[in-house]
Amino acid sequence: MLTCNKAGSRMVVDAASSNGPFQPVALLHIRDVPPADQEKLFIQKLRQCCVLFDFVSDPLSDLKWKEVKRAALSEMVEYITHNRNVITEPIYPEVVHMLVYEFFLRFLESPDFQPNIAKKYIDQKFVLQLLELFDSEDPRERDFLKTTLHRIYGKFLGLRAYIRKQINNIFYRFIYETEHHNGIAELLEILGSIINGFALPLKEEHKIFLLKVLLPLHKVKSLSVYHPQLAYCVVQFLEKDSTLTEPVVMALLKYWPKTHSPKEVMFLNELEEILDVIEPSEFVKIMEPLFRQLAKCVSSPHFQVAERALYYWNNEYIMSLISDNAAKILPIMFPSLYRNSKTHWNKTIHGLIYNALKLFMEMNQKLFDDCTQQFKAEKLKEKLKMKEREEAWVKIENLAKANPQYSLCSHASTVSMPLAMETDGPLFEDVQMLRKTVSDEARQAQKDPKKERPLARRKSELPQDPHTKKSLGSSLQSRRAGPPGRALAPWPRGTAAPPLPARSL
């Protein structure tokens, strides 16, 4: 049964599920009627397709009429795609009201589409409702919405500022309130195309959007869902205006993850994309804080973080920037590279570190030697300082022993002396030996790349405690023997062992 509710020139047709199956009037094909009647029939089909069917609670209901609607939609898509001058003014409100994604998209892309007529129906309210649908969990729906919104942005100049403002509001709510939205990646993909078309010089509004909206998106926990699109938007801004490089890089360093290694790898990926388009004059402004962070990444116990940071030395453009500023960069990076050349647990990292040291050594041999000597001098100074601390503790202990009360409380406490542990790499190699080691290890790393070595999970090799082993053995024997005077019956092979009594556990 049909119920028709008229509102002005619009007609809403609903299938009343409580009154039996939907039975619309069968309509002719548009091509089978005279041209004078095609517009009227087209509008009838649009209104007929406003009927909503149940595909969730009862997917098998109204199968015949679902097929009728599907055929009508396919016919109308073909009609507006292959015919000209068929989108007349009375068609616009009906299409906007019916709104099936694929048909609406073909409608927007048609050469007959006239934005001046459509703007009466595709207004700010329509755009706001369209943006709300981006939170859909269906990726197919979000993909249609993405393309549809992009077409609207391109055809309706008067709506562009409003669309950007509403997208900003979605991002603000996502960053500072909900931290959940399904369509962030699609919205960023649209913005990537929009940013690519920004005129130069950039407006202040667009710069604020970068600094206040895009960069704080790096804080959200679900960054991995939309990071490729976000990084693309950021790089597009820097290609438009290189003076934004410093605030962008400093913001990334500010939001740098401290305990989430996969997110740290994403930041390193984005940072390399930024360095690929950076101007040498802008690189000078950010190189010191940037390489201090890279030095921390090289020292990371998570091998993927250290590996991703060391891959920067395989980038020719980055290496040219480093070479031009080696006097500033090498003293920052050298301690981390030198310490981890022997002490990092992952052998692949050793090879990458020796490769980086070799490149630094080839850039400026004298500077490399100076950094080596300076590092050793600093470590010697640290050892002397540690020795002074130990001597100070010895003096304190001797003074405590001289106290008359010492004998009364000595049995209750034990003073443990701090031990100096050397874990900072090969401190006692001379410069010539270091050069030879770096060259040999870098050459070996090139011969034995990581991808050729099979990954093997290694078991921990822990020394066995004899007391623990003895206790476990005696416990096992007592369980097998069972209680005195009672033998445990063996269970059939291939079946689960019966549970032990509670008293024996």
Image (cartoon, rainbow, N blue to C red):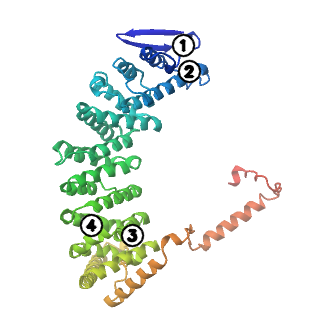
Within-10-Å neighbours for mark 3: few <14, some 14–19, many 20+: few
Tell us which disc is closer to us: 1 or 4: 1
**Quick one: 254 or 479, which is closer to the camera?**
254
Does the image show residue 310?
A: yes
Query: Are there few (<14), some (14-19), or many (20+) residues within 10 Å of tag 1?
Result: some
Identified at 46% across, 26% down, the residue is 79
Q: Is residue 290 above or below residue 22?
A: below
* Dots 3, 4 in contact, CB < 8 A: no
Q: Amino acid at mark 3?
A: Ser
Determine whether 482 is above or below 364 in the image: above
Q: Residues within 10 Å of mark 2 (few under 14, many from 20)?
A: some
Q: Measured from the top left, where is residue 274 in percent x and y?
A: 29, 58
Which numbered disc covers residue 413?
A: 3
Q: Earlier in the sequence, mark 3 or mark 1?
A: 1
Q: Report the Cα–Cα distance between label 3 and label 1.
A: 93 Å
Name which residue lies at 48% across and 29% down. 78
Q: How far across and down, in percent of the image, does residue 406 sit?
A: 33, 73
Lower sequence index among marks 2 and 1? 1
Q: What residue is shown with label 1?
A: 24
Q: Position of residue 156 (x, y in %)?
A: 27, 31
> Which residue matches tag 4?
292
Tell me, yes or no, whether the two marked residues, 4 and 2, touch with CB atoms within 8 Å: no
Measured Cα–Cα span from mark 3 to mark 2: 89 Å
Tag 4, which secondary structure?
Answer: helix
Identified by mark 2, the residue type is Val
Frontmost of labels 3 and 1 is: 1
CB atoms of marks 2 and 1 within 8 Å:
yes
Residue bearing the label numbered 2: 68
Which of the two labelled residues, at mark 3 and mark 2, occupies the earlier sequence position?
Answer: 2
Q: How many marks?
A: 4
